[in-house]
Amino acid sequence: MQCVKVLGGVVGAAALLGLGIILGHFAIPKGTDSPAPSASAPQDLDLEILETVMGQLDANRIRENLRELSKEPHLATSLRDEALVQLLLGRWQDPESGLDSAGTSVYEVLLSLPSQEQPNRVDVVGPTGDILFSCQRSEENVTGEQGDPNVVPPYAAYAPPGTPQGLLVYANQGSEEDFMELQRRGVKLQGSIVLTRYGGVGRGAKAVNAAKYEVAGVLVYTDPGDINDGKSLPNETFPYSWGLPPSGVERGSYFEYFGDPLTPYLPAHPSSFRLNSDTVSGFPPIPTQPIGFKDAKVLLCNLQGTSAPDSWQGALGCDYKLGPGFRPDSIFPEHSKVNLSVHNRLELRNSSNVVGIIRGAVEPDRYVLYGNHRDSWVHGAVDPSTGTAVLLELSRVLGTLLKKSTWRPRRSIVFASWGAEEFGLIGSTEFTEEFFSKLQERAVAYINVDISVFANATLRAQGTPPVQSVIFAAAKQIPAPGPSSLSIYDNWIRYSNRSSPVYGLVPSLGTLGAGSDYAPFVHFLGISSMDIAYTYDRSKTSARIYPTYHTAFDTFDYVDKFLDPGFSSHQAVARTAGSVLLRLSDSLFLPLNVSDYSETLRGFLQAAQQELSGLLEQHGISLGPLVTAVEKFEEAAMVLGQHISALQKGTPDPLQVRMLNDQLMLLERTFLNSRAFPEERYYSHVLWAPRTGSVATFPGLSNACSKATNTGPGSAAWAEVQRQLSILVVALEGAAATLRPVADL
Amino acid sequence: MQCVKVLGGVVGAAALLGLGIILGHFAIPKGTDSPAPSASAPQDLDLEILETVMGQLDANRIRENLRELSKEPHLATSLRDEALVQLLLGRWQDPESGLDSAGTSVYEVLLSLPSQEQPNRVDVVGPTGDILFSCQRSEENVTGEQGDPNVVPPYAAYAPPGTPQGLLVYANQGSEEDFMELQRRGVKLQGSIVLTRYGGVGRGAKAVNAAKYEVAGVLVYTDPGDINDGKSLPNETFPYSWGLPPSGVERGSYFEYFGDPLTPYLPAHPSSFRLNSDTVSGFPPIPTQPIGFKDAKVLLCNLQGTSAPDSWQGALGCDYKLGPGFRPDSIFPEHSKVNLSVHNRLELRNSSNVVGIIRGAVEPDRYVLYGNHRDSWVHGAVDPSTGTAVLLELSRVLGTLLKKSTWRPRRSIVFASWGAEEFGLIGSTEFTEEFFSKLQERAVAYINVDISVFANATLRAQGTPPVQSVIFAAAKQIPAPGPSSLSIYDNWIRYSNRSSPVYGLVPSLGTLGAGSDYAPFVHFLGISSMDIAYTYDRSKTSARIYPTYHTAFDTFDYVDKFLDPGFSSHQAVARTAGSVLLRLSDSLFLPLNVSDYSETLRGFLQAAQQELSGLLEQHGISLGPLVTAVEKFEEAAMVLGQHISALQKGTPDPLQVRMLNDQLMLLERTFLNSRAFPEERYYSHVLWAPRTGSVATFPGLSNACSKATNTGPGSAAWAEVQRQLSILVVALEGAAATLRPVADL
C-alpha cells in the first residue's frame, strides 16, 4: 500500500508542526475567569472557551485512550466490554475531569454467537465424503493479538445454524441482479452453495436474495480487488502495510433491521414483550459464513463453468468461473462439493449503555447528544475505538472545565457509549425507544463519531441539511492536519465538493443511511443528526473501507503505524466534533440552518419533475401540490431567516430566542410520519428513508413509482404513488407551517 | 315533562336575580388601564380582566346569537352552513370586537345524503305485494319549522342503498348480546328486517352486529321510555313540553370511525390521496333507516312470537314481542313483510372550518384552542348552536378587550368553528391532520363546548386529569344560575361527585370518548382536552339525551322555552369555559395539574391488580413492572409539585417557567403510542382508547385480557396481553421521565 504509506509518513512528520501551530494559536490562556452561570443571562457561545477546548484536545491522550480501549477484544456483552463500561463510568465520574453525572442502562438483547463447542466450518468434500480442504477457522496470528483466546471466530451474526452441502457457484456480490444473471445463464442454483464477495448490497441481502433461488448456503469473502487495491500477498499486507492479510475475515451482523430483534419499538427491558425468536423477521434465511480471501482463492480459482462477466472478476489472480462445481482438472475431484457447517446460537445477553450528562446552565431541558458505540468485533482499534478515544478526550476536556467552574454550557450535553452496535445499532435504538417522548421533545441534535479516522486525507461528514452550516463553521476555524496551512474546511473542499445553487462550491455533506448509531435518532425520532470522521483520498485507494475492518487485524498498532501516526487526524476530528458540540450547546441562537433544507427539497423536486412527471401525468397524477408545498417551505424558510437576522441585531428577549430555537429544533421532527413506510422498521423520516427506486428524489415517491411502473392504471401500486405524494405534501406543508411566524396557523 | 317545566320555571325566575348579583359582582370597572404587553414582563393572569370578562358575558346576547344561528337548517356544506361561515368570519373580523385574524380552511370530504328524487321508505307489504302501511317520511310540522324545505329527511348517514324486504324481528338495542339472545331463542334472523331502539351501543354497531346474522336491513327508533321518561302522547311532548313528539326521528352518522372516510390520517385537500369509496371500511354493511316511535309502535305492537325479555320492553304501551313477522290477529295479514328502501348517496362536498386567532403577547407559539362544530342535522338549536352562541359571545367579549388594547393574552388563543362534525368529527379531524406537527409541538389544551346546555341543573365536564384543577378553580368562583347562592362548583358537587383519595369529595370529571370534536385532539394528538356543558338533574329524568336531539324539533323555541329560559345556564357555561380559557392562556404557570394523573393511574392499577392479576399470574405475566412504573410516575409528579411550589414562591426566571410549562404541556403527549392499537383509527392515547373489556383498567390491557381469557397458554391473544403491558409500562415510564428534573435522563 505504497500510496498510503507515503501519505502516512508525510502526515506523521507534519503532525508535530501542526500541533505546535495549533497549540500556539489556541492554548494561550486568555483569562477565562469562571463566570457563575445564571439563567437570566443571555449566555452565548464563548469564543475563548472554544479556543481553550480546541487547544486542550490532546493527540497523545487520544492515542493513550486508544491503546487502552483496544488492548483486548471487547465483543458486545463480553467481560472486556463490561470492563470498558467501568472505565467509561470511572472517567465520567472522575472528580477532576468528570461530568455532572453518569450511569449505565442495561438491556436484555438477542445476540447471535458462534458455538464454542462446535466451530463453524467450510470444507470441500469429495465424492466419497472425505474432507479435501478446510477453510481456516481463525485468522493467522501475525502480530500475537490474533491468538488472543477472546477473539471471536469469524461468523455471520444471526445466520441460522445448518449444514448444507452442494456444488459451489460464484454469485458475485449476491445482488438480485447477480442471481438473475446466473439464472439467465442457466447456472443451477437450487441446492448450491454460493460464494459471494462483500460489497454492492448489504450483508443480509446476499442470503435473502440467494434463498429466493433455493440456494442452500452462502459464503462471503473480501476480494483483494475491493479492499487492498489488488494487493494480496502476505508481505504486501498488514503488518507490512495497511492491507488486509489473506486470512482476514470481515465479521458482521446479517440482521436486516436494526435494534434488538425481539423488541421492536420497545426497550429491551427484562420484562418487555418479546417476539418469538423462531418466527422473527429479518434474519438471513439460510446458513451463511464469511471466509478469508486466501481460502476464497482456493475455492474460486478451481471452479468450472463459463467465465464470470468482467465486472464480476476480482484480484485473486485467476479467471473467475461461475461453477457449479470444480473443474475436473482442478485440485478437487469431479463432483466435489462444499459443505458449510454453521452452529451459531441466539442468546439473550445484557448489554450496557453508559450515559453521562453535563447539566445546561440556562436551558437544561435542551439536549445536545454525542455518542459512539463501545463494542467491537475483535480488538476494534479503528472500529469503534478511534471514536471512543476521541469521545473520552472530549469529555475529559469539557469535564475539566466544568469541574474547575470555568464553564457550564447553556444547554445540557449528553455523552453516550452505546452497547451492541455491531449486532445492529442495538444500544442506541433501545435508548431511543426508552426515552422516545423526552428525546422528541427536547433533543437539539445528535452527533455521532463512530470510526473517527478511516485515513488521514480529509474530513468526511454526513448529516441532515440543518447541520451543514455548523459543521462548516467549525471546520473553517480549525487547521487541517498535515503540512498545508489550510483549514479543515479548505482541505475538505479539495477532496469532496459540490456546486450549491445557494453557496457555490462547498464540501459535500453526505446523507445518513443506517451505518451507525445515528440511524434511530434521525429515522425514528427525527432529530437532526450527523456523523463525523477523517477519511481517504479516493484518488489513492479504492478500498471499500479500511482493509482490516471487522477483522482480528484491527489493532492499536494498525492505527498507530498506518492509519494516523501522530494522531493528528484524531485530534482534528476531536476538534471538529468538539466545536460543533460547543456551538450547538452554547450558542444563544441554535446554529441549525433549517433553510438549507430548501436546497434539498428543490433538488428532490427537480429530479421528480425531470424524471417522473411524464410517467405520473400518464396516470393522471400531478406534481402540482408538491411544487406548491416546496415553494411554501422555501418562502417560510426565507422569511424565518429574515426574522432571525432581525432578532440577532437587537437584544432579543430570552423567550423570543427560545421560541425561535424551538422552531429550529423541531423542524426535523415535522418530516416524520410513522405511517409512511409500514414495512420499514423505524424509518419514518419522509426525506431520508431507504431509496430503492432509481430516481434520486423523495424516497417514498421514488420507490412507489419504481414499483408501479409496470402495473396497469388503477393498480394498488399506483394508489401507493398517490398516497406517498400526499404524505410528502402534508409533511412539507407541516414543515413550512412550523417555520412560519408562530402566531399564524 | 312536569319536572323539567317546574325546574325551567324556577330557573327562569331566578336568572334575573342571579344576573343582577353577578353583574354587581363582576361588572364594576376596576381600572383596567391598557398595559402595553411586553415579552419580557412576567405577564400572569389578571384577576381584574377575568372579572371584567365574567361580567361582560351576556345571557341575552347568547340568546340572540342562538336565534340567528338556529333560524334555518344548516346541515354540513349546505348554503346556510356556508352563510354561517360568513357570519362567523364577520364577527371575528369585526374591527370593534373581532380577533387578530380569522380565515377558513376548506376540505373536500365524503358525506352521505338521502336522495331527493327517491326518498327513503319503510313500508309494510302484504303477501300480494301491496303496501299496507308506510312510515312517515318526514316529521310532523307542529311549529312550522319542520316544514322548512331545507329540513333533511330522517336517514342513517353512510348506510348503503338497498331495498331489502323481510319479516320483522325486534332486536332490542342491536348489541352483540341482543342478537345472541335472539339466536338462543331460535328467532330466525337470516333475511329479516330488525327493529332496534337507540341506546346501548353506537349507531353503526347495530348494523354491523345485525349483518353478522345475515339480517337484511335495520330500523332504528327512539323508545319513549328511553327519551321521554315514558311520555308518548302528542300533548305530552313538544311544543307542550320538552318531550320528543311521536314523529320525531333521530338522524345521525352510522360511520364507525371519525374523520373524512376517504382520507384517514391525511387532510382532505382536493389533491389528497383517497381510498376507494366502494371498499372503505367503517360504513354500515346493510341498509338502515331511523323512524319515529309513532311508526315504531305500529310495527312493534303488531309483532308475533314470544315476549321480549323484561329489559327489552319499552313505553309504547304494548307487550314487545320478538317476531319474526306480525301476529295473525294484527292489523297486518299473515306473512306481511317490511320493505326498507334506502337511497342514500355518497358525495364529495366542500366543508369549511373557520379559525380565528388572538396572538399571544409573550408566548405566541403556545396555543390554547377553543372550538365547537357549526353544522347541525336540522335547525340544530341545541346541537350545536347552544355551543356556538357561547363561542360567539366569548369571542366578542375577548375581541372587544383586545381591540380596546385593554388586554392581550400571554399565549395565543385559537377559536374554531368546525364543519361536518355530525358526519363524524370531520372538520376537527382534518384540522388535526393538517396541523399535526404544529399542534403536537405547541398546543397547550383544547376546550370543546358543543351543546352548551342540555338542561339547567348542573355543570358537567369531561376531560383528561390535568384539566380537572383548572375547571374546578373556575367553577368555584362563578355563581351557579338559579336561586341558590352556591357556586357552580358547590352546585355541581351536589349532583355528581366522587370520593378522591387525594382531595376527598369532589365533582366527578367525566372521561372523553369520541362524542364530539375533542376526540382527534386527545386521542390522535395527545392534547389535554375537555368538554363543558350544563346538564340534567338525573334524579328527575332518565332521558338518554335531550329529547329532540337530531330531530326537526331542536329549535330556538325549544331552547328558549324548555331548556334554558333566560339563558342563565348558557351564561354559566360561557363564564366557566371563558374562565378556563383565560386561566390557560394567561397564567404564568400553566394551570394543568399533571399530578392528578397519579390518581387515575393508581385507580387503573388497583382495578388490574384486583381483577386481573390472578388470571395474569396463571399465564406467567406479572404486573410488577406496571406497579413500578406507576410508582415512578407518582414520585416524579410529587417532586415536580414541590418544584412548582418553590418556583412560585420566588421570582422565577422566564425560561425556568417556560421549561416547567413545557413539561406540563407535553405530559399528555407522552401517553401516545401510534402502534398501540393498530385497528383503532386515530386512537393512540394508551389511557383513553376505547375499552371493550369489562375490567375498568388501562384499556389496552383490559381489552387484550378480555380477548385472551378463553384462549390457551401461548396463544397470540396472550402475547398481545404482554405487548399491551409493555406498551403501557414504556408510556408510563416515559411520562415519569418527562416530569423528572429536566437534566436527568
Image (spheres, coloured by chain):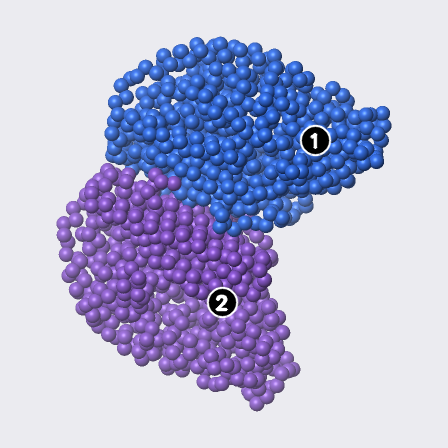
Chain colours: A purple, B blue
Identify which residue is drawn at 65% across, 15% down.
B236
Identify which residue is drawn at 32% across, 75% down.
A539
**In the figure, residue A207 lies in which quadrant?**
bottom right
**In the figure, residue B658 lies in which quadrant?**
top left
Position of A223 compared to A324: left or right? Answer: left
Position of B479 compared to B237: left or right? Answer: left
Identify which residue is drawn at 76% across, 21% down.
B318
Q: Disc 2 marks which amino acid?
A: Arg
Position of A631 compared to B671: left or right? Answer: left
**In the figure, residue A512 lies in which quadrant?**
bottom left
**Mark 1 highlights which residue?**
B196
Q: Position of residue B1 (x, y in %)?
A: 61, 15
The quarter of the rendered structure image containing the C terminus of chain A is top left
The quarter of the rendered structure image containing the N terminus of chain A is bottom left
Kindly identify which chain the residue marked by label 1 belongs to: B
Q: Is residue B10 above or below residue A82?
A: above
The residue lying toward the viewer, choosing from B669 and A738, is A738
Question: Is residue A592 in sight in this rendering?
Answer: no
**Mark 2 highlights which residue?**
A203
The residue lying toward the viewer, choosing from A317 and A201, is A201
Q: Is residue A376 above or below residue B151?
A: below
Q: Disc 1 marks which amino acid?
A: Thr
Identify which residue is drawn at 52% across, 10% down.
B10
Q: Position of residue A486 (x, y in %)?
A: 21, 67
Q: Position of residue B703 (x, y in %)?
A: 60, 39
